[in-house]
Amino acid sequence: MKVAVIGAGIAGLTCAFELHKAGVDVEVFERDATVGGRMNTRTKDGLAFDVGANFLIRAYQRVNALAGEMGVTLHRASPVAHRFYRDGVFHLMNFTSIRDIFRLDGLNLVSRFRFLAFAVKVRTAHAGLDFFDLGLASDDLNREDAYSYAVREVGQEFADYILDSFNSCMMFSRSTETSVAAFLSLFGMMADPAFDFSVMHAVGDMRAIPEALAEKMVVHRGCPVLAVEPQGGSWSLATQAGSSRFDRVVMAATPLAALKMLKSGPEGPAALLAQTRYASTINASFRVPMEALGRTHCFYVPYVENRVISEFTNESLKGEHTTHEGTSLVNVGLHEEAALRLLGEDDAKVFEVVRSELLGLNASLREVADRVTPYDLQRWPEAIPKYDCGQISRVKEFLREGQGREGLYLCGDYMNAPWIEGASRSGQKTARQLLRSLA
Ligand SMILES: Cc1cc2nc3c(=O)[nH]c(=O)nc-3n(C[C@H](O)[C@H](O)[C@H](O)COP(=O)(O)OP(=O)(O)OC[C@H]3O[C@@H](n4cnc5c(N)ncnc54)[C@H](O)[C@@H]3O)c2cc1C
């Protein structure tokens, strides 16, 4: 039994590792020279920086377990604050425990009480939900968008400054494009006293876990798969080096890339890939003097306050290797709306627009404006999947009816839940489904 996994992001690597442990002959094909996909790290001009995902949280059970298995140490970046922007000021917005709701001084007292009451209600009424396994939510919760629901149930202020700002910061799209199921799963978890949203970093940075996983298996790096086609009961994979045959194929690339490869085969996978939507973003990093950076890790910028920047993070908190000659990085993510406008512009134009907005938002950076200089720019047409009502229902149906048909499997963050935890769990689930089909 030979299995090909296409894509060495965390989803594909987790899947391949589970298969490898079960004794399956598995080969991973990766387009890029490095593994990790949207979970990667580079070093430039003396500074190490994460490209794509830039932090883990304590509540990532699967990722924590993988790190342990790989011997990668995770450490808590502590104590750090998260803040959201309102009327010229960054206000505290931590979610390490339910008590933090009282400390949200950017919300009026009535909104804070409504938020608390809502969190407790969600916790009791929807105890079985899990943000990292969105398929657990019933179809009833997949009929309305999170924003409209939050305005009605908790209030406008909460919807704009907490929900929408969290959504735009972590997923780059608006909460009008997220389902109630995803919203309740997330806020229900946050209301659990055992839930821990503490920021975690890996020793060796984001690339450490994917690199350690790749060491354990056969991974063809710099080897894009050009075509995937069924051929007489097995699958043919074409690369620049020629074509090879596999009994099963796991496509663990993002939907646009997967669609390009899939030349024929059952209809279900192609239909799901074509209907899946991702939010786009651009990440612009700036080199800044250390004295302008405090202990705030993540700055959330609500759409109602600024339509260009959705968030920025202080990279200096990851350790000495992310600082150099008294400088470190501020990593800025854009709201999807601005990213779509700027994706086709040249780097200089994007840096100019983002720098001007950043200085407008952050007074400490404004004071050292002449030393806030462009460092790196990444365009992400497919940044994070949109977990709208349709996506969750379509994936559930596909997992019931289409996954594994004719030996073809789909895997990735869009198949389960967002972020590294959602992607890794998708990899684990896919491996289990495939192993069941062999039993
Ligand atoms: C800017 C940004 C910030 C983020 N921040 C965070 C964060 O702080 N924390 C967090 O948990 N998550 C974050 N995420 C989300 C997280 O990075 C992703 O959800 C997760 O890494 C997705 O993993 P994946 O394996 O599903 O996909 P990917 O990582 O995209 O992996 C797909 C792989 O397929 C490969 N591939 C594509 N085409 C081919 C081909 N033809 N042949 C072979 N290989 C191919 C790609 O090169 C890639 O390696 C962020 C994402 C972005 C873009």
Image (spheres, rainbow, N blue to C red):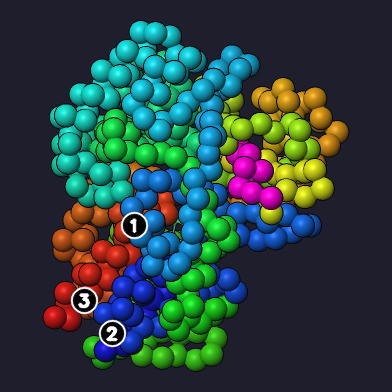
Mark 3–mark 2 Cα distance, whole angstroms, equals: 10 Å
Residue 241 numbered tag: none
- Between 113 and 381, which is closer to the camera in this rendering? 113
Q: Is residue 373 left or right of residue 236?
A: right
Dot placed on the residue nearer the N-terminal end, 3 or 2:
2
Dot placed on the residue nearer the N-terminal end, 1 or 2:
2
- Between 129 and 388, which is closer to the camera in this rendering? 129
Judging from the image, what secondary structure is the residue with disc 1 in?
Answer: helix
The residue pinned by badge 2 equals 23
As shown in the figure, which amino acid type bears the numbered disc 1?
Answer: Arg
Q: Which residues are magenta?
A: 309-320
Q: Quadrant of residue 142?
A: top left
Mark 1–mark 2 Cα distance, whole angstroms, equals: 21 Å
Dot placed on the residue nearer the N-terminal end, 1 or 3:
1
Q: Residue at x 73, y 25 (%)?
A: 364
Can residue 38 be seen in this snapshot?
Answer: no
As shown in the figure, which amino acid type bears the numbered disc 2?
Answer: Gly
As shown in the figure, which amino acid type bears the numbered disc 3?
Answer: Leu
Relative to residue 77, is residue 31 depicted above or below?
below
| Quarter occupied by the N terminus | bottom left
Q: Residue at x 40, y 33 (%)?
A: 96
Q: Quadrant of residue 298?
A: top right
Q: Quadrant of residue 399?
A: bottom left
Residue 435 numbered tag: 3
Provide residue 313's location: percent of width, then percent of height.
60, 39
Judging from the image, what secondary structure is the residue with disc 2 in?
Answer: loop
Provide residue 293's location: percent of width, then percent of height.
69, 33
Can residue 33 be seen in this snapshot?
Answer: yes
Relative to residue 244, is residue 436 depicted above or below?
above
The residue pinned by badge 1 equals 62
